[in-house]
Image: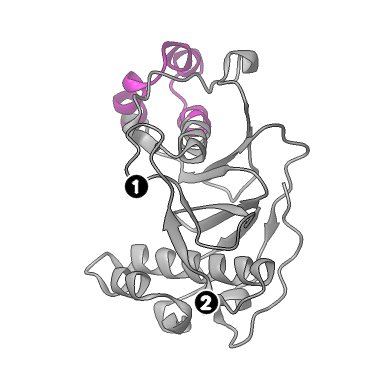
Amino acid sequence: MWQLRVDHLAEEDLDPAELDAEERARLAAPLRAADRLRYGIGHIALRRLLAPRLGVAPAEVAYRREPCPGCGALHGRPAVEAPPGAPHFSLSHSGDVVLIGIAARPVGVDVETIPETATVHEVAAVLHPGERAEIARAGHAPEAFARVWCRKEAYLKGIGIGVARPLDQDYLGEDDPSARPGGWAVEDVPTARGHAAAVAVGGTLGMVRSSWLPSSFVTASTTVEAPDGRP
């Protein structure tokens, strides 16, 4: 996995030439400036991480959507178009952090800013009963809620359904890891202060490894070699 801080960058630092038409349109959409910045940084970094693994230039990385596990329509997990056996990936961004996971197996990542206490009380009510109980025992601490939420989002992104799946269906709490969904390893990821993050990988997961990318990784005209961020 790789992380990158966005608070030292501005939109004018980015060159969208490596992005495809859909990504450039999204970058030009009337979003908040902070959202555009995170989007641009995340997608440029993802292309530059995938390109050497595919043997192509960043601009040549092509994406597709996998079938949704729930309905079969092509709005499931994003994937690399080719070649067969291409790595799986997941991208998340929030606050000052972009988080990217690349793996040989299905993977999901999520990073979130620590929410306000009022948000915890409001949103925790839709979670699994076991998760709600853990958050309540923690005094509805925002940090405890954020860890649970990130694990849940990472898992749901990994299986390709996302938050369209009922949020009370799967247990991703801390007290009983054996009660978590089978076939997936889900772990917290150390990240920047004021944020929480998690990764979910199909199968087993060893020690979680995450490397921080320098700002030059997305601003340099030639790709800067990324440090090893394998999970």
CB within 8 Å, label 2 to label 1: no
Q: Amino acid at mark 2?
A: Glu
Spatial CA distance of label 2 from label 1 is 22 Å
Q: Is residue 13 above or below residue 185?
A: below
**122 displayed left or right of 52:** left
Horizontal and vertical percent position of residue 87: 63, 55
Horizontal and vertical percent position of residue 207: 78, 39
Q: Is residue 99 visible?
A: yes
**162 displayed left or right of 137:** left
Rendered image quadrant of residue 11: bottom left
Between 38 and 102, the one nearer to me in the picture = 102
Between 81 and 28, the one nearer to me in the picture = 81
| Residue that label 2 marks | 60
Q: Residue drawn 49% across and 74% down?
A: 9
Q: Amino acid at mark 1?
A: His
Q: Is residue 65 above or below residue 25?
A: above
Q: Residue drawn 61% across and 57% down?
A: 84
Between 213 and 89, the one nearer to me in the picture = 89
| Residue that label 1 marks | 75
- At mark 2, the secondary structure is helix
Q: Residues within 10 Å of mark 2 (few under 14, many from 20)?
A: some
